[in-house]
Amino acid sequence: MKLIEKRNIFYIISLILVTVGIVSLFTRHLNAGIDFRGGTSIQVKATTSTTVADVRAVLAVVNVEKDAEIQQSQDQFIIRTRAVLDDAQTNQLKAALTAKNMVYQSKDTVGAVIGKELWQNAIWEVLLACAFILIYISFRFEWKFGVAAIAAEVHDVLLVLGIFSIMQWEINGAFIAAILTVVGYSMNDTIVIFDRIRENLRNKRKEDYEALVNRSILQSLNRSINTVLTCIFALLALLIFGGVTIKYFVIAMLIGFVVGTYSSIFVASPIWYELNKRY
């Protein structure tokens, strides 16, 4: 299997996917949750048969029914609204919920200023993670490995962000944790292949770099596939049984783990090969 020979095909596939994602990010933007845009999140439990329409009708008491986002998981409801409810409104809502056989469980409020700070902190977290990864890879291997690894990480992050923008899935603080987890997973997968390349370089046979990289990828392929499948099975279980609260956190990791495995094989390794040819 000559993967490096077909690298241009993978470059085109990645370029198309990343470009579509970037266009969506600039046109549709991300669907920021209350962690970033500010607002109120309320968790409610129904004691009798209750629909989303019933919950929305109750929200009319505090005049937030129009912009409220309601998610249901069996008898649990999560209500998100851009309005920040004060104590008086909260007490009104509690009374209305009780009258409709619903139990008020918790409320989280985030101001607009805090939301803006979280955006800035999230961007810095991802940038710092990439910077430390570049330093670590360059120190452990060489700068060409570092550049190739960071290119793959940027590819993964942009694809996850692009898909969330296209689908308009809500992002929150947990989404940033998912992105950082994806970065770490993808980097680990990339390092395994790079370590195999370095080992084969030390014991280099009479073969060119293209054959060497192909051999290194194939030697690591079973491990990469088995690892990502194990993670996917665990994440699917979380997606099915974990409830609505962690749904998009799990989806982000599912997409990221698959994309991270792809980029380690079809993006990072070919880019290292290109850099090694030129420098």
Image (tube, grey):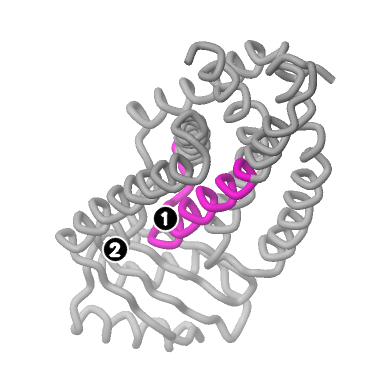
Question: Does residue 205 appear to the left or right of 48 in the view shown?
Answer: right
- What quarter of the picture does the N terminus occupy? top right
Q: Nearer the N terminus, badge 1 or badge 2? A: 2
Please indicate, yes or no, whether residue 163 appears anywhere in the rendered image.
no
Label 2: few (<14), some or many (≥20) within 10 Å? some
Q: Quadrant of residue 262?
A: top right
Quickly name the residue at label 2.
64
Q: Quadrant of residue 75?
A: bottom right
Determine the main secondary structure of the stretch shown in magenta: helix
Residue 105 image position (x, y, % from top left): 44, 85
The amino acid type, in three-letter code, at marker 2 is Val
Question: Does residue 168 appear to the left or right of 239 in the view shown?
Answer: left
Indicate whether 178 appears above or below 149: below
Looking at the image, which is closer to me, 244 or 17?
A: 17
Please indicate, yes or no, whether residue 169 appears anywhere in the rendered image.
yes
In the displayed orientation, state which residue is furthest to the left: 113
Q: Residue at x 48, y 35 (%)?
A: 142
Indicate whether 39 appears above or below 185: below
Looking at the image, which is closer to me, 80 or 186?
A: 186
Residue 226 image position (x, y, % from top left): 81, 50
Q: Kindly state the secondary structure of the residue where label 2 is placed.
A: loop
Q: Residue at x 59, y 51 (%)?
A: 185
* Marks 1, 2: nearer the viewer: 1
Query: Is 23 in the magenta?
Result: no
Which residues are drawn in magenta?
A: 165-191
Quickly name the residue at label 1.
176
The amino acid type, in three-letter code, at marker 1 is Ile
